[in-house]
Image (cartoon, grey):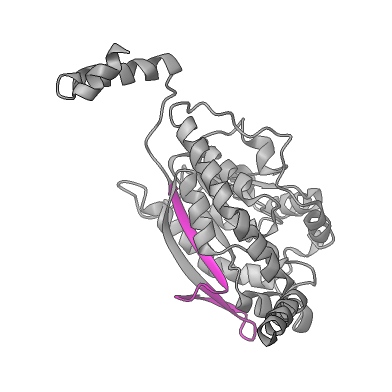
């Protein structure tokens, strides 16, 4: 009896104090079934690689998030304001992107940096990361579903004639440009974005589809831990006011393990995952081995082009393989007779 009371009280505590725990268990309950179906679908589609791209009717944009950022659109370039941590984050994320991309360039010439590379900055906001990438020589397209964000970004880049030529901004979601930009970009950047989308798997699939073979995907985001809830939401939003209340939803945070699993299922190999720590007193970011709060990830798309194989050709190939082995395997020989 006491055991039953204890379990009941413990469950009540979980539901009242940390409602996300129940959701995690409920999600985990169905996880094995989703994995099974995912594997079956992958097996079926192995020979039929012409699976269509995601239609523009699908969206990963959260309308609630759009309203939040719409109200803050005019504050992007205030380096002492609410976006100060993102300005400071450039000290880490710009070299992180640059250095990893330079590793992919054979016979790189010093001084030219990312010249000639095409980069897509997804969820670019006011262009805080788009502009530094443009200054490194890359041709950058920045996209964002919030019209006022793009207006702010357009206005700011107009002050620099060089950036005006290298950077293009569009008001749209990633899904809206998947078909027209399939395998177009050398790199896709989604910095502080994946924790705001409503369908992470679809979003990452679209990122993969617009990448060239051997292209790089760069992500910075927040881990889904108790510490990230305590510091990322309770402290940062509700106590210290480092970011506005309601900016983040803990349920949307994603662990490096979950991220890596989704990326690898879409043909991307994770190269690097490294922790990032923000000091609210100094206003600076630092690299860390601890990924329990913020972290950065770099993944590379497979460079092997897989061509569509027709059902007739696939069946013919299986038959030829059986015939080749028939002389050494009696069971196979009997199978061919059927």
Which quadrant of the figure contains the N terminus? Answer: bottom right
Is residue 294 shown in magenta?
yes
Segment tinted magenta in the rendering: 276-300
Instruction: Measuring from the top left, give residue 132's x and y in whole percent.
Output: 57, 58
Say if residue 220 shows up in the picture.
Answer: yes
Instruction: Measuring from the top left, give residue 255's x and y in whole percent.
Output: 55, 64
Which quadrant of the figure contains the C terminus? Answer: top left
Please tell me whether residue 33 is drawn above or below residue 314 in the rendered image: below
Is residue 219 shown in magenta?
no
Residue at 74% x, 79% y is 17
208 and 282: which is toward the camera:
208
Instruction: Measuring from the top left, give residue 215's x and y in whole percent.
Output: 45, 44
Please tell me whether residue 179 is drawn above or below residue 111 in the rendered image: above
In which quadrant of the rendered view does residue 125 lie?
A: bottom right
Residue at 67% x, 39% y is 175
125 and 176: which is toward the camera:
176
Magenta span dominant secondary structure: strand
Residue at 64% x, 64% y is 25
Say if residue 216 shows up in the picture.
Answer: no
Instruction: Measuring from the top left, give residue 18's x and y in whole percent.
Output: 72, 75
């Amino acid at each position: 009896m006491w055991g039953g009371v204890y379990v009941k009280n413990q469950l009540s505590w979980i539901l009242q104090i940390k409602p996300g725990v129940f959701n995690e268990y409920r999600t985990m309950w169905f996880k094995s079934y989703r994995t099974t179906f995912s594997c079956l679908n992958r097996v079926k589609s192995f020979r039929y690689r012409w699976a269509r791209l995601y239609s523009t009717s699908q969206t990963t944009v959260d309308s609630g998030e759009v309203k939040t950022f719409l109200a803050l659109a005019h504050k992007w370039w205030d380096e002492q304001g609410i976006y100060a941590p993102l300005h400071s984050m450039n000290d880490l994320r710009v070299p992180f992107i640059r250095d990893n991309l330079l590793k992919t360039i054979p016979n790189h010439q010093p001084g030219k940096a990312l010249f000639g590379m095409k980069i897509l900055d997804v969820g670019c906001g006011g262009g805080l990361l788009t502009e530094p990438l443009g200054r490194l020589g890359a041709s950058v397209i920045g996209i964002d579903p919030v019209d006022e964000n793009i207006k702010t970004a357009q206005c700011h880049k107009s002050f620099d004639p060089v950036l005006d030529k290298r950077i293009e901004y569009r008001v749209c979601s990633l899904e809206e440009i998947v078909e027209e930009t399939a395998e177009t970009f050398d790199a896709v950047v989604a910095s502080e974005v994946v924790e705001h989308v409503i369908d992470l798997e679809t979003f990452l699939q679209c990122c993969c589809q617009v990448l060239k073979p051997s292209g790089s995907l760069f992500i910075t985001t927040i881990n889904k831990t108790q510490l990230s809830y305590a510091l990322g939401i309770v402290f940062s939003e509700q106590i210290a006011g480092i970011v506005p209340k309601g900016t983040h939803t803990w349920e949307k945070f994603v662990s490096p393990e979950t991220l890596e699993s989704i990326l690898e299922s879409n043909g991307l190999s994770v190269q690097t995952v490294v922790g990032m720590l923000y000091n609210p007193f100094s206003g600076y970011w630092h690299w860390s081995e601890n990924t329990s709060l913020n972290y950065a990830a770099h993944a590379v798309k497979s460079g092997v082009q897989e061509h569509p194989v027709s059902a007739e050709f696939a069946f013919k190939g299986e038959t030829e393989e059986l015939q080749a082995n028939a002389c050494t395997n009696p069971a196979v020989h009997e199978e061919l007779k059927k």
